[in-house]
Amino acid sequence: MEKNEYEYSDSSYGMNYHVIEYAITNTSKDYYYTWIDYSNTMDYSKSELIKRYFFSYHGDFNLMSLLKDNCIILDFKPEVGKSFLKRINPHDTFRYIVINSKNVVYEDHIIIISLSDLGQWADTPFNEGIIYDADYIVLYDQ
């Protein structure tokens, strides 16, 4: 993961911005997945992180049930920390762009796993309507 930082000012609003960009480039032949886990990720193994994110219930659902369900979900809006999941195809790059990052050290919370890390759960295709499609996501830390 490559990290770049920069600052700029917006004179019309009198605001200064601190931007951190985390670029993840998949240089392998395997698919990779990324998400943000706001817990203390250093305390968990890769398999524990997968279980926590994919199988913990957030209200009435867990992420794995959404990914494996064959229903059509219209206007799905992923929630970072609960249902946001991005697949990074081989040779593609995904960027987390964090504006005004003061409270959260995002590199400690960005999870990157390979498709093979998902083990048996990767045997059947995921519901593509749940996978985040854009090449970047902008996070604003207030």
Image (cartoon, helix red, strand yellow):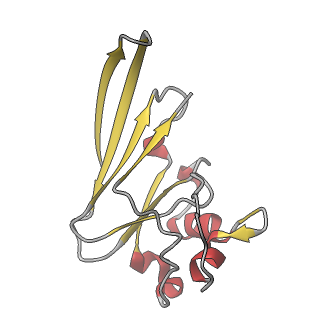
**In this view of the protein, which residue sits in the foreground, 69 or 37?**
69
The residue at the point 48 percent across, 36 percent down is 105
User: Residue 46: image x %, image y %?
Assistant: 50, 66
Q: Is residue 9 above or below residue 76?
A: above
Q: Is residue 118 left or right of residue 80?
A: left
Q: Name the residue at 78% across, 62% down.
A: 59
Asked which quadrant contains residue 3, the reply is: top left
Up/down of 97 relative to 31, above or below: above
Lateral position of residue 5 relative to residue 70, left or right? left
Residue 82, located in which quarter of the rendered image?
A: bottom right
The spot of residue 111 in percent (x, y) is 46, 57
Residue drawn at x 44%, y 76% as measured from the top left: 117
Q: Nearer the viewer, residue 8 or 36?
A: 8
* Residue sitting farthest toward the right: 60
Quarter holding the C terminus is: top right
Q: Position of residue 21 (x, y in %)?
A: 33, 39
Q: Quadrant of residue 86?
A: bottom left
Residue drawn 58% across and 53% down? 43
Outermost residue, bottom side: 123
Q: Give the mark count.
A: 0
Q: Position of residue 18 (x, y in %)?
A: 39, 24
